[in-house]
Amino acid sequence: MKGPMGKAWPAIVIVTALAVGALVGVSLLSMGAPPSQGASARSGDDLATALEVIGVIKTHYLEPVSTVDMLAAYMRTGTINGMLKESVKDPYTRYMDAEAYKQFQIDTSGHYGGIGIYIGIQDNKLTVVAPIPGTPAAKAGLQAGDWIVEVDGRPTSEMAQEEATTLIRGPKGSTVELTVERKQKRFKVRIAREEIVVPAVSTVQLLPGQIGYVRLLQFSEDAPAEMERALSTLEQKNYRALILDLRNNPGGLLTAAIDVASLFLRDGPVVHVVGRSGERHTIEAGSVRAHPLVPTVVLVNKGSASASEILAGALQDRKVATLVGTKTFGKGLVQTVIPLGRGDALTVTTQKYQTAGGRYIGNEGIEPDVVVKVPEGDQEAPPLASGKVDLNDVQIQKAMEILTRQLAQAGGRAEGG
């Protein structure tokens, strides 16, 4: 894989999303058949593997962790993920057995089977970060911020994220029942699983006033190429301004975030990463093909996480775009996927990041330049069932208003970068 300047990225995978299953920190609960009997949520009970994991944690984890505490937690729980949950206490540092790691590698390609939902741990609750548009989860009405209380009657309060993933997975045509809490009201929903292929870019459209619209769903391996094709399509239609919709985009690969940012930024910082030593490393933009800069609005909401926050923060800090919507999720940690010795792997929080302007956003999120809340009872960034932009969407209306005004003031294309 190449970086924005054509340099090779490390062989290990660096992810910025919310967990294990395609986007670390966000499980992609849209996977295929359930794992075999040997690949249960209690996989990894082998002491030798536990010791290997402890060695990786001691070497790579962002903060110091006591070996004694990890061993004691392993003896109490009998599982590696139980050990990590009790001693490391980081929901994004998780062990993947060989089957789960294989699924992770499939997930990062953007091809899944299941219900089509991203989850994360927020306030120690299994939380919907975003449903994937057009999937069974979206059609069933699940929304960003929903708390998954039970999966097929099993409480999730003490459930590891991987265990929840395993329970929600299943073959095409089978169903899963979720108990969901939204605004202190609980309800049950039964969802039929499907085979799902999710593109990185779901919608490219030219709106009135020659305003282009692109909806980016995730930062998968294909995201930079799909985003470049989307911009090229709009250029052919002589677009004069752009709405980039990152609402309910839970993040993904750090490499993809940098490469997408490089389509908008000629040079200079995209993100700063800070490791366990406290040393800060700056990742800069650079693109083989520079796209013309036009007035841009980026739409964000509470489902915009991780890599989405890196991109939104960079464009906001570098004065390339105006952010519109509501405050983002607030995940400022970076995970590295480290293969182990038996085809298994560990996702380890190795760095925290700052936006291009030097802001830490962990647990804080990014405040948009213009706050626009949807009316009570409406859903933010609903799936585009028709494939067309809803011009009655209040956040899109505000974006068009801002861009129309900027075009009138600038007299056309913007300069800078």
Image (spheres, helix red, strand yellow):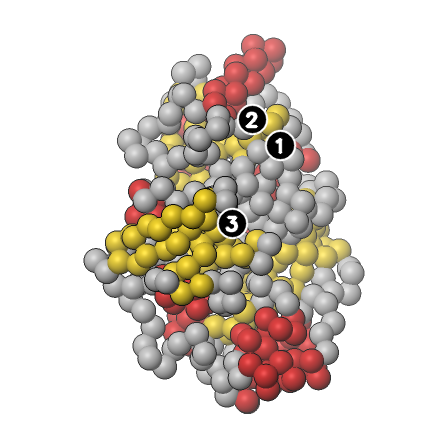
Question: Is residue 233 toward the left or the right of residue 272 in the image?
Answer: left
The residue identified by callout 3 is 251
The residue identified by callout 2 is 372
Closer to the chain start, of discs 3 and 2, is 3
Q: Name the residue: 40% across, 76% down.
A: 40
Quarter placement of the C terminus: top right
Question: Is residue 169 toward the left or the right of residue 255 in the image?
Answer: left
Query: Front-most of 371 and 311?
Result: 371
Instruction: From this view, report whether residue 175 is shown above or below residue 395.
Output: below
Q: Name the residue: 43% across, 24% down.
A: 393
The residue identified by callout 1 is 368
Residue 280 seen in render: yes
Q: Hey, what amino acid is under mark 2?
A: Val
Question: Is residue 154 toward the left or the right of residue 172 in the image?
Answer: right
Residue 2: where, in percent of width, then height?
A: 52, 55
Q: Name the residue: 59% across, 86% down.
A: 75
Task: Give the mark count.
Answer: 3
Labels 1 & 2 near each other (Cβ < 8 A): yes
